[in-house]
Amino acid sequence: MASSMRSLFSDHSRYIESFRRFLDKSTEHQCMQEFMEKKLPDVIARIGNTKSEIKILSVGGGAGEIDLQILSKVQAQYPEAHINNEVIEPSAEQITKYKELVAKTSNLENIKFAWHKETSSEYQNRMMEKKEVQKWDFIHMIQMLYYVKDIPATLKFFHSLLATNAKILIILVSGTSGWDKLWRKYGSRLPRDDLCQYVTSSDLTQMLEKSGIKYECYNLLSTMDISDCFIDGNENGDLLWDFLTETCNFSKTAPPDLKAEIMKDLQEPEFSVKKEGKVLFNNSLSFIVVEA
């Protein structure tokens, strides 16, 4: 591996920029929205039964777009309840964006927000030091388990925080997605960072089964338009390359043979589909609902 290649996570602003480009070019949020519309009402059907206050914990809440969709569904289901929504998010930039979004969103009067600038493991340590267990009615962990060192221990801890009828919603890439193939084939040739690990729904469901935790899994198709990756020197393409490979300035620093190999594979049917002149990478998501 070329020594000049470094992890995308070593440059936070480049990571945020490539992540935003990924959101622009993918149906990631539309796919999540579809789940929130069609499936979430059933998932949360009993979490607030007989409760005047519903406690929700957002683990890795990001800039809050998906969180607010979840909250609107909980409000619709339990219009009389007060909602206590706490957010764990390590990025100050994302918390600022979340607060800005809340400030310009109406109908949030019955929701109390609190933000904690910390990782999930820092939250876990803080709670264990306090020795008082805060129980939650709904916990969601959206696209964040890649950044956890010990996933089984994290799952066990948050599962122990569930109140009666409570649920955890976990969203991460599907074992049938192009990510799974990309990571398995090229992971060892790309710069690794202890901040991030390759994990898909296939790995996660195995962990849950091993721990004896009950769950249901739903898969929804999502795609990312990677056509710009095949245009040399295209800024969008360069940022998407960084996101795909989790490598900072991949196009400029990767060995040419590695880039050529991945570029060829990205056009193969197990990674992408070609539609109307576009190359659409398989970004399919899994929605895993864990029961108390």
Image (tube, rainbow, N blue to C red):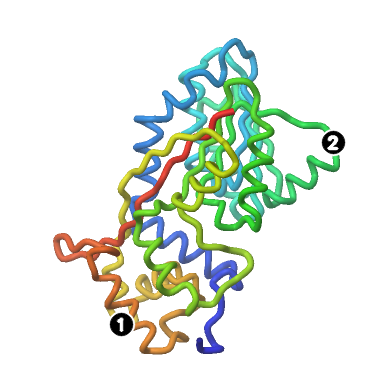
Q: Secondary structure at mark 1?
A: loop
Question: x, y (%) of residue 122?
Answer: 74, 50
- Foreground mark, 1 or 2, reads 2
Question: x, y (%) of residue 267?
Answer: 24, 70
Question: x, y (%) of residue 172?
Answer: 46, 49
Neighbour class for label 2 at 10 Å: few (<14), some, many (≥20)? few
In the image, 263 versus 106, the foreground residue is 263
State the residue position of label 1: 232
Q: Is residue 2 above or below residue 23?
A: below
Q: Which residue sits at x=44%, y=67%? A: 183
- In this view, the residue farthest toward the left is 276
Q: Is residue 277 above or below residue 49?
A: below
Mark 1 or mark 2, which has the lower sequence index? Answer: 2
In this rendering, position of residue 204 left or right of residue 148? left
Tag shown at residue 131? 2
**Distance between mark 1 and mark 2 Cα atoms:** 55 Å
Neighbour class for label 1 at 10 Å: few (<14), some, many (≥20)? few
Q: Which residue sits at x=49%, y=24%? A: 44
- In this view, the residue farthest toward the top is 50
Question: x, y (%) of residue 139?
Answer: 59, 35
Q: Amino acid at mark 2?
A: Lys
Occupied quadrant, residue 224:
bottom left
